[in-house]
Image: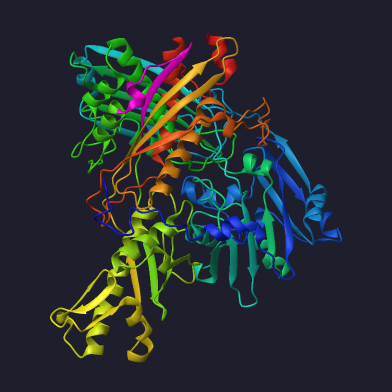
Amino acid sequence: MDKSSEYKVVGKRPIRHDGVDKVTGRAKFGADINLPGMLYGSVLRSPHAHAVIKSIDTSAVMSHPDVFAVMTSEDLVPGPTVETVFPAQNYSENVMARNKVLYKGHPVAAIAASNSSAAQEALSLIKVNYEKLPGVFDVENAISTSSPILHENVNPYSLGSSDYTQPNVLGHELYELGDINEGFKQAEYIFEEEYKTSTVHQGYIEPQNGTASWSEDGKLTVWCSSQGHFGIRDQLGRILGISISDINVIPMEIGGGFGGKLPAYLEPLAAVLSKKTGRPVKLTMSRSEVFESTGPTSGSLIRMKMGFDSNYQITAAYAYIAFEAGAYPPSPITAAAAAIFAPYKIDNVKIDCLDIAVNKPKVAPYRAPGAPIAAFATESLIDQAASSLDIDPIELRLINAAKEGDRRADGVMNGKIGVIETLKQVKSHSHYQSKKNGLNVGRGVSLGFCRNNSGPASLVASVLPDGTISLVEGSVDVGGSRTAIAQIMAEVLGLRSEDVIPQVGDTDSIGFTSVTGGSGVAYKSGWAAHEAAIDIKNQIVKRAATIWDKDETEVEYSSGLVRHKSDSELKMSFKEIASQLNDTGEPIMGKANVNPGGTTGSYSALIADVQVDPETGKVDLLKLTAFQDVGYAIHPSYVEGQIQGGIAQGIGWALNEEYFYDDKGIMRNNSLLDYRMPISLDLPDIEAVMVEVPNPNHPYGVKGVGEASISSPLAAIANAINDAVGIRMRSLPMKPQKLQANL
């Protein structure tokens, strides 16, 4: 949609507010913190994937001249028992192992020293006595009756209609819609397959970090790069056993997160060490620590069955989803269940989900958590069905496309979604209509999905005497939200985007705001910006009426100008009235505290052309065209960047990326040299096509745009490989040696 005639700021491409600081190096990230008297921390991590901690001897380390303090799990509040509240236990035991280590890299102790070299050196003085246990590293082995048990005190779960007593199954979810048995009876064609994916990491540039300073009056201040400083505050309160009113978390610039910077890792350790020493303490992870000790996403096993009638409509769909949780639950099985059949209208569905413990780091969200894995299975099987039924793959998807008013299997009723509109754009696009050229060249398509989130959001905007606005929001800016929020406020007030100066407030200076995740920031904080701008607008009208000694009802505000409705001589610009605020009354401040509902899922699609070398199994990407229903694009450049970024990450997931463990549970590719993420030479230009189907529930039609695009490359590339060489790849990554073995 052309918004040029409708909006003056929204839909445009202003210079980003944080751009200059970031390109000049002035932007401050977590590791840039330097405080007077600051100490440096280091963490001792388990060399074993699974072991009982028999004893920890820290006596020798305190004799080191540069060491000021040491800590273990004894310095943290014990979590509740597993039977009581498993997630609460995770907060404490994942940041510092208590009785057992459950993955290689699990923290067992931490020290604070005068410098980072000394801190790292002194770790060898801590003596830990381990009783090694056998480990388990994938879902299939974890649920076998002979598997080692990670959590002995977990009660068996009742799974479906039968009792399942394997303790490594830590959670079960079952979703049913309609009558699955009747649906398969109606099917003329039935397709059934199994799919596997490997553990992969978010691959953010900036490692985790945390700096803490505990003041004499009992107040804790923490600086960190996170996706939710209020979430970090709450986790610190639980782990340390202190009131959140005694904690202030200051968000720094963030060098990527993609869900991986939602949990606390180093912040609680820095806090304890600071309290022990009475000095600020900073900890920063190495790259190997990031890989081995923070949350990747799940490896998985999915078994799927789909039935089609003679008109090619899906009559029934079944999915068995088994996700690695890592050392502790939960994994994103709930989100996977929401995503797995989301693009389609299916009346009869059953989705059976298992959350399974393995000796790997506890998983964390990764861009559209659970959805890429789900889409890989569904879109691969849909493509297989299209091929077997001899029908165009886009046409088959259009026949079965979900629309507004259809109910998903997870119970959600679809709002204004753009599946059909997106598919029609794909079908009519020149890329899809073009001929393939070259030997062993194939074309594949796939849909993707992300269920968008909302949540509480707070925002305060102060009108300054020069006619600009100082805006403080609670949402951490990961992908350009400060500029988008400024645009929305500027649009309401008839100002330029540059006239709104946005910043992210700390937990003491702004009201509670939920995490930056689930593509929800532009929705919730954009809504807050709209409400706060209206608040300012109303106050400006009231102030003008006071200055002119007129009734408020006789004054109107439009396009940055206040005027009397009948007296053309009475008018002032926003900047003019702002300059008089201090002389005519109190300051003007707009505020909003919102928790808006009405989000809708976002849908993406990808056309991928590949060429396969049959001698080596190498897959070259020739051409990629990405489509996504973006609602209204507040800042089109940001939106295009989000689409392209998600596609790039999905490509890595599809072709290269995986955690490679040996039989002892040691990750052997824990560096960016060996963990093979895509580089510029691997990627062709990615054309981003924005399909604008506005969300009627939002003042500016916003839908989340940051996550859906990662869901489509996995299956699109697999389908393209099949089109090129006739081989269906059902396990990821589709690395050359794996593909070559099937050629």
The answer to whether residue 56 is seen in the rendering is yes
Q: Position of residue 145 (x, y in %)?
A: 52, 23
Q: Position of residue 403 (x, y in %)?
A: 21, 36
The answer to which image quadrant residue 387 occupies is top left
Front residue (pair 214, 225)? 225
Position of 91 with respect to 536 (left or right) is right
Is 122 located above or below residue 602 in the figure? below
Q: Position of residue 182 (x, y in %)?
A: 19, 20
Q: Position of residue 110 (x, y in %)?
A: 71, 54
The answer to which image quadrant residue 279 occupies is bottom right
Is 322 located above or below residue 469 in the figure? above
Numbered-mark total: 0
Q: Which residue is at a point 29% across and 65% down the rendered structure image?
A: 492
Can you say which quadrant of the picture contains the N terminus? top left
Residue at the far left in the pictured view: 566
Q: Which residue is at a point 56% across and 16% down the rendered structure image?
A: 738
The answer to which image quadrant residue 459 occupies is bottom left
Is residue 436 inside the magenta stretch?
A: yes
Q: Which colour style is shown?
A: rainbow
Which residues are the magenta region? 429-449
Is 24 located above or below residue 731 in the figure? below
Q: Which residue is at a point 22% across and 89% down the rendered structure image?
A: 548
Is residue 673 inside the magenta stretch?
A: no
Front residue (pair 391, 100)? 391
